[in-house]
Amino acid sequence: MTIFKCKMCGGTLEFNPGDTVAVCDSCGTKQTLPKLDDDRRANLYDRANHFRRSNEYDKAMGIYEQILAEDNTDAEAYWSLVLCRYGIEYVEDPATHRRVPTVNRAQFTSIFDDDNYKSALHYADAAQREVYESEAKAINEIQKGILAISQKEQPFDVFICYKETDNSGRRTPDSVLANDLYHQLTQEGFKVFFARITLEDKLGTAYEPYIFAALNSAKVMVVLGTKPEYFNAVWVKNEWSRYLALVKNSGGKKMLIPAYKDMDPYDLPEEFSHLQAQDMGKLGFMQDLIRGIKKIISADAPKAAVKETVVVSGGNAAVEPLLKRAFMFLEDGNWQEADAYCEKVLDQDPENAQAYLGKLMAELRIPTQDELKENPNPLAELDNYKKALRFADDSLRTVLTEADEYIHQRNLQTAYDNAKQQMETASNELEFNHVAELFSSISGFEDANVLQEECLRRAEGCKKDEIYNSSKRKMSAGKYKEAIEEFSSVSGWKDADEQAAICKKKIAKQKEVWKKKIKILIPILSAVVILIILFVKLAVPKIERNNALNQAMALIESGDYDAGYAILEELGENETIQSNKYDRAIKLIDSGDYRAAYVLLSGLAYKDSAEKLQSIKPLLLAKANHPGDTVFFGKYEQDKDISNGKEDIAWLVLAKENNKIFVISEKALDCQPYNIEQYANVTWETCTLRKWLNTDFINSAFSSDEKAKISTVTVSADKNPKYGTDPGNATQDQVFLLSITEANKYFDYDNIKTCRLTDYAATKTSTGWYWWLRSPGDYHGLAAYVNFDGSVSNDGYIVSNSSVAVRPAMWISIK
């Protein structure tokens, strides 16, 4: 038995050698374990975990990196680096008493893109991976909330970093000095982050979003202190160490200024040794500091890109500094600030083309004007592009139109190359028709029209080949009449006409043989037939019926229901069939086998079978515990017969969490375009199929009570794993489609991704059993889909195609 300290609360963990997951006796938290090959490594982990629990993340990271230098396959060390990078502190939830993560070092990058997280998953076993993925999901949700809040904050010029209280909870001299500095800088017109004042209206909320926003926007940080231990206090160091990392990556656009008083400058943190520190006790300190800050902020000055921000309408010189700031923010990647400054320009000059250009670049996350043409999608339909073009001078208008035309031509070329590649690998009618549609979407580009016709010709050839081969098989099996019909449908193809003629000769030859046999047998058979007819009329019908009834019931008793019911159906004993199915269903309900009972009662019109059927549906929901279970929920037209009403929808259970199940329709229920407009810059967030699912479909398929059980969930914006196409933003939906990632996650093999269509859906498609995924394809004019063989197409289908099937997915409450 090995004893180790809990990495969350410091309590004791006991586990056996070889274990990779354990539960803490103190906090009850399930957690992963490191590789503990010897006492030295265990001591290193204890020391590193102690620093991390104390929020001394940089110290902890140094030790974890030392562990990895000795063994680069230790999954737990990689995971611990992730916890340090995002400043994860586990605190006790007062309601549940569980340890939950908080983020003290937010990042712009998602935890899922972190290299150390990927390494942790790579080297983890299955038990560890499950814990890492669950924790990462929780951390990612917290970070998204932090980023959402921080993006709404206005940018700061100066960040004052200091220690507010001492160990006794009293205000420090540093706090008083910081307060004086705050007021001096504010009077000079700077926007200053000073926690004591800036965060005073944020009591009761997490401070990290506001600190994160300020650290990233501030051009200068002043770290002040009167004691070495105040500079190295955990949360003070947390702020200045994060800012130093930003300074390093800013290309000289950010500056950290240490300021000290009543202490030796050599006692400042070693990390400040390369910086020019300021003595706050020196006469004229404040004036020198303010002058230095002004130089730093004004030095972040006009660059080549900024020259493009000259106002082209209105001649309003007052907005030029605002435009310069906006384009500087764009270069820094501070999209929110850039957009905010462009809005300030437009408040003064509503027809300023450069401001609309800045808003367009912020919207598209483009740092320089030259990179406009690198945008993946055309610009022409974007509002900011239209306004920039409307108010632009000739020079800017040329830049904008050339960029949009470049994108358009590049995307046409990409679509053309993709279609040609798929044409080379196509081998059947469906695939050639699909490629023909791809060429149709770029009609007029190079030889796309010619290749479209070629694909249609090859598709027709594949179709005729299939019919021809089928005819040959029927001919070999002696089914000459069927073979003749099929050969005739492809008359002129290969030697179909000759083969049809051969079949006709064989039929004629068979007739001649039978004629000769019948001539010989007629006299003999006549007498026998007369006797048989008399016997059948008198005795046989009754005997045969009784025998058939007995045989049918024996088959049913033995469990061969289909065979037994087939005989009863021939005898016209439909009521006997319904009675037997009803009795069997009641027994199955009593035994708890609701799925089998549902199948028996479906379509049955006997006694209270309809009421029994409806009573089973909520029981099936309540018992749905495992992936692969089937539930029935809602109604939708499926059999093409509108007169008999809608049919119950069967759903396949993909997952269960708490009191909710994740389901997808067993069959494709309809066929709809992913987006009505073919060339739209479309993502799942903006497509018309999302709107249809959450309005037309949900209102048609579910009652008010049923809709109340469908959860509104965050639908993630998953990138195309092959092409990395921008998926847009996450959405809040009740009904949605699977992404490529989810389709591969919930369906282990291609063959179980295949999907049958309802009879109703089949009337609306010419593409076969393709069904949409929500992920974008190779570019935004295409959307991913699942092929007829169950394989996922990352390349995608034209979004405006109305023949691709729809399999809705959703989370249902089963309380």
Image (cartoon, helix red, strand yellow):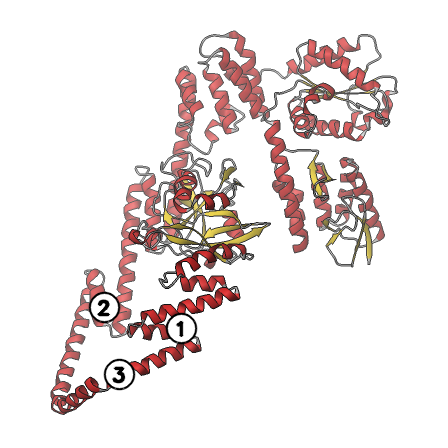
Give the mark nearest the N terminus, 2 or 3: 2
Instruction: State the image coordinates of residue 251 (x, y, percent, origin top left).
Output: 65, 25
Q: Where's the N terminus, which quadrant?
A: bottom right
Residue 393 is situated, as x and y percent measured from the top left of the image, at 41, 14
Q: Residue 53 is drawn in which quadrant? A: top right
- Quadrant position of residue 184: top right
Residue indicated by mark 3: 542
Q: Secondary structure at mark 3?
A: helix
Residue pictured at 34% horizontal, 38% vertical: 442
**Residue position for label 1:** 561
Q: How many residues crowd mark 2 within 10 Å: few (<14), some (14–19), many (20+)?
A: many
Identify which residue is drawn at 31% across, 38% down. 443
Q: Residues within 10 Å of mark 1 (few under 14, many from 20)?
A: some
Task: Report if the CB atoms under discs 1 and 3 are less than 8 Å apart.
Answer: no
Q: Which residue is under mark 2?
A: 483
Amino acid type, callout 2:
Ala
Q: Secondary structure at mark 2?
A: helix
- Say which amino acid is labelled 1: Tyr
Question: Of circles 1 and 2, which is in front?
Answer: 1
Left or right: 648, with 18 as reference point: left
- Image location (x, y in percent) of residue 754: 43, 56
